[in-house]
Amino acid sequence: MTPWRAGTMLSAMTGTADHVGRNRTAWDRWAAGYAGAGLRAWAKTEPSWGIWAIAEARAGVLPVDLAGRDSIELGCGTGYWSAWLARRGARPVGLDNSAAQLATARQLQDRFGLRFPLIHASAEQAPFTDASFDLAISEYGASIWCDPYAWIPEAARLLRPGGQLIFLVNSVLLMLAIPDTEGLPATERLLRPYFGMHRFEWPDDESVDFHLGHGDMIRLLHGCGLQVEDLLELRPEPDATTRHTLATLEWARQWPCEEVWKARKLC
Ligand SMILES: C[S@@+](CC[C@H](N)C(=O)[O-])C[C@H]1O[C@@H](n2cnc3c(N)ncnc32)[C@H](O)[C@@H]1O
């Protein structure tokens, strides 16, 4: 099953307590299939975002100066984002719910001679004291695999006043337009309701992912003391390629397929 694609959408109130364990099982099973992509990403010198590998130089998401900044990657997977941050002078910590993903991250640390702490925990309950970090980042990590009503308050708690939260998710439009059938890309029709979007389940898989509408996300961020600075709707280059089947290039050139939220903790 390809991750990051919606199945059956459940309301905000249906069973939510089980998703951390279910996603841990799923990611321990999927981890081997992500090791190659992790290696390729670690080998890249320039950071890039999402399934179309949109260059940071074009997207302009990161703070210009990362030197000496304490960062935490929530759902770090193979850890390539933390590696890129370290190469820009940050002091990263990678946190992930899957021991198998972290094992790949450790192998890649050894291979590239670049080490930073890797913590096995859920981003909904991070084992750090308040105000420990200047930057919290997530690219398809906690940002879609954790309940936003749990992980975003936790990220806000971890940030120092003035610290930044940056996360990439599937766009809201994509989540409304992607069919239930595995492997089929987003359509030009809205296939499910926007109102009430929160928890998504796969008909034939144990994993659970989460996606909020824009109004709900803005209210949640504000409620956690985070001021929204930007919502970047990423557009791939005309010749971009991807191994993922979420959307065709033609679709992603017309509608945002991925979006990056930037928010800052109020001082
Ligand atoms: C698609 S990967 C994203 C990470 C990275 N960008 C990558 O591709 O390697 C998703 C990661 O989120 C992690 N994850 C899922 N639920 C989590 C949770 N509750 N807390 C922390 N990480 C979680 C998974 O274990 C997985 O490694």
Image (tube, rainbow, N blue to C red):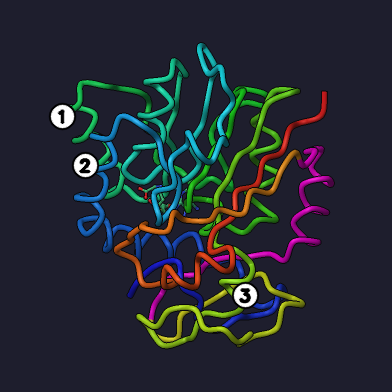
Give yes or no for contact between labels 3 and 2 (Cβ–Cβ under 8 Å).
no
Task: Tell me the residue at 63%/80% (across/down).
Answer: 10
**Residue 147, placed above or below residue 55:** below
Residue named by callout 3? 15
- Judge the density around disc 3: few (<14), some (14-19), many (≥20) Cα neighbours within 10 Å: few
Q: Which tag is nearer the camera, tag 3 or tag 1?
A: 1
Mark 2 or 1 closer to N-term? 2
Seen at 84% across and 47% down, the residue is: 223
> Magenta part of the protein: which range?
205-228
Q: Picture quarter containing residue 174? A: bottom right
Q: Please state which amino acid type lies under the numbered disc 2.
A: Leu
Q: Which residue is mark 1?
A: 111
Which mark lies nearer to you, 3 or 2? 2
Name which residue type carries label 1.
Answer: Arg
Magenta-colored stretch includes residue 214? yes
> Taking 145 as reference, is 192 left or right?
right
Question: Dot 1, how many residues are within 10 Å of its Cα: few (below 14), some (14-19), or many (20+)?
Answer: few
